[in-house]
Amino acid sequence: MTSPLLVFTTDFGLSDAYAGVMKGVALTINPDLCLIDLTHQILPQNIAQGSFLLGINHRYFPQDAIHVAVVDPGVGTDRRPVLLSTPRGRFVAPDNGLLSGVISGYLESDPTDSGPISLPPELSAVHLTNPEYWRHPVSQTFHGRDVFTPVAAHLSLGVSPEDMGELIDSLVYLPIPQPVQTGGIITGRVIYQDVYGNLVTNISADILMVPKSADVLIKGRSIHGLQSTFNDANGTTNGKLIALAGSHGYLEVAVSNGHAAQFLEVSAGEPVEVVTEPA
Amino acid sequence: MTSPLLVFTTDFGLSDAYAGVMKGVALTINPDLCLIDLTHQILPQNIAQGSFLLGINHRYFPQDAIHVAVVDPGVGTDRRPVLLSTPRGRFVAPDNGLLSGVISGYLESDPTDSGPISLPPELSAVHLTNPEYWRHPVSQTFHGRDVFTPVAAHLSLGVSPEDMGELIDSLVYLPIPQPVQTGGIITGRVIYQDVYGNLVTNISADILMVPKSADVLIKGRSIHGLQSTFNDANGTTNGKLIALAGSHGYLEVAVSNGHAAQFLEVSAGEPVEVVTEPA
Amino acid sequence: MTSPLLVFTTDFGLSDAYAGVMKGVALTINPDLCLIDLTHQILPQNIAQGSFLLGINHRYFPQDAIHVAVVDPGVGTDRRPVLLSTPRGRFVAPDNGLLSGVISGYLESDPTDSGPISLPPELSAVHLTNPEYWRHPVSQTFHGRDVFTPVAAHLSLGVSPEDMGELIDSLVYLPIPQPVQTGGIITGRVIYQDVYGNLVTNISADILMVPKSADVLIKGRSIHGLQSTFNDANGTTNGKLIALAGSHGYLEVAVSNGHAAQFLEVSAGEPVEVVTEPA
């Protein structure tokens, strides 16, 4: 029989035992679980980064996966613990915007302000108020261990969401910065830097948005045209600054066999312009 | 059928393949194992840190878990490989004090000197001398792969501890530094710094020991009163030095949305005083 | 029933979600998989290091393991995706030399030039050309997610290699630097530095090759004789530069309770000489 799947996305890092302890708690409740890490290396307390990575990457997991997502600077305050059910998985998380990237895929248009938004009809949510499914005593500082993981493990045993708290019809939403198009110029920004130093922007790599012949401008440099890979066929491109449609589905700026973030001395937030028509 | 559980706690890090290789060895002996990392990031050869983290965190795992614990600067010398059986799990480890944090929970009072201590009645131990349950050839430098993991995997198959070596009635104990109380002042120290920079002390967060109104002194600074969370409800506390009852069960010093270790320029060993009565 | 085993060896690191996403893709195809990391911390795009670690360490895994190996600077170019079947596991990887360490064990003599080599009779390989077993759309930059992992997951379901592409009889081979013996002197080099700073050389620790009384020369220093452990029995060796037969099966240079790479200021590539007869 297939094991139910829990997927962890947190900012706990791997230096401490926090990630391991959550797995111990999960297996104590349901010893048949399959436990997978999406990542524990969200930048500390960076809800926007967690929202971006979870929004893009939960689509690669089975639709019956239960995600435990914890980037939770407000742990112990009155921010709500919630469960969000979607056609592509269930998510146990603090209600602080961390699930915006997941919710975004179901919205017709992206809100521009932070705050509660009404859930679209494909989604349902529960405010987790029933302490029967928590670990006791509940600490004030580690709800990943004491609330979110126990709830997820009980879900995996078949407990229904309605038993875990009260149905709610809105969640806190943190808008995802959208690129702006003016004439032939799209202005976006770097939203993520990966371990290779590749700079992922918020500009969709959709060919209609960024044609292959576009110029990409970043920190005073101009890159002409999009490459399809990090290297050309004859491998002579070492150290060349390039732009390409990256695996996240967005425009990326990279250096072939190099580190674009260090080379350009930029990080998340840096403006990027795509010029699709010559000035 | 539920898979038997092996939990790894080592100082091997994740940069090398050492942790992965132990899992290969375990699955070669018992392919049905569930393998979980508590952490591989104990500071290199820091037995005291391993003892502290294992002592606190093994309690979150199922009681039938088999723990493989390896912080082993004496590998290849005559330090003994041992198996410790407790009501809260079995532990395969070098006999160098690494299991002190586990044993501590069963002692009536904590010894003050390092050395062998007699085991309390709830615990039993075996000196692992039977090479039938090891991997051969046994290297002189990697008993995690060649002795501890194979023994744990065979245990998971139902081999009895008595078949693996000789019953012993003492293990090496490394005293855990205890805070000292003099009048209204408790003097302890920082024993662990987590990835957020939070400073975990050896002063139990028990309300009888540290009342909420206490003053906490560290590196010339005084913190008045204990917070219950890292942030207050209105989120205006960024950068504030605070003290609180942390999730490990001990008093912690932290900076709201900041890094206390860097802010105070302190690390493990730093003295901390709690003043429960005004001077 | 025992779960089929997938083992990952990549240079993706753990800071991003790349490793986690591959696991999601694998479990979407076969939810019964057991997923293990050998390491995701191969140095970025360092095919030689990946080849070395995979060659040594795959032997510790069950013989029916399916390895997903991705160090792939040429992703998206015309380098071939391949499947290699061996008596000690199957390997899905780019055909760029990454499997040389695995192939090496079946060769009578090691080639000295890079390039295609004919496979020995124990091995068989397939050029993965059948897109039916890939994830679509296939990105140009992340074949670990879109090609290698889906192929491995389908293999675990019993799809035969022949259905996945065309049988081929050669693979790209990247020679593993071999030590040279001249009279009583063996000249090799450091090929790997582990997280402790231990320097692993390419000189086999076989006693016939390196007798215990040999002198080991590195960066102007001479080490007399081989130790059997990192520490001697009385623990007085802190900080001492030593040579020993390491757990990888090769001669290692280390500092007892210290960091040889920092102490000597050397890294991979550094020449090492073993003098087995006095000059």
Image (spheres, coloured by chain):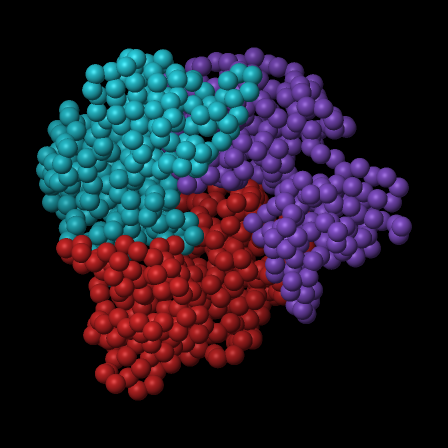
Chain colours: A red, B purple, C cyan
* Looking at the image, residue B191 lies above or below residue C129: above
Please give the name of the residue rendered at 24% of the width and 41% of the height, measured from the top-left corner: C98
Is A40 left, or right, of C210 in this rendering?
A: right
**Residue C93 at x, y percent in the picture:** 24, 44
Please give the name of the residue rendered at 48% of the width and 13% of the height, measured from the top-left corner: B130
Depth check, front residue: A37 or A27: A37
Please give the name of the residue rendered at 21% of the width and 36% of the height, measured from the top-left corner: C100
Q: Quadrant of residue C167?
A: top left
**Residue A56 at x, y percent in the picture:** 39, 63
Is C142 left, or right, of B203 in this rendering?
A: left
Quadrant (top left, top right, bottom left, bottom right) of the C terminus of chain A: bottom left
Is A138 left, or right, of A106 in this rendering?
A: right
Count how many numbered circles sit on residues in the image: 0
**Residue C213 at x, y percent in the picture:** 36, 13
Is C59 left, or right, of C170 in this rendering?
A: right
Depth check, front residue: A275 or B154: A275
Please give the name of the residue rendered at 20% of the width and 74% of the height, measured from the top-left corner: A213
Quadrant (top left, top right, bottom left, bottom right) of the N terminus of chain A: top left
**Residue B221 at x, y percent in the picture:** 75, 54
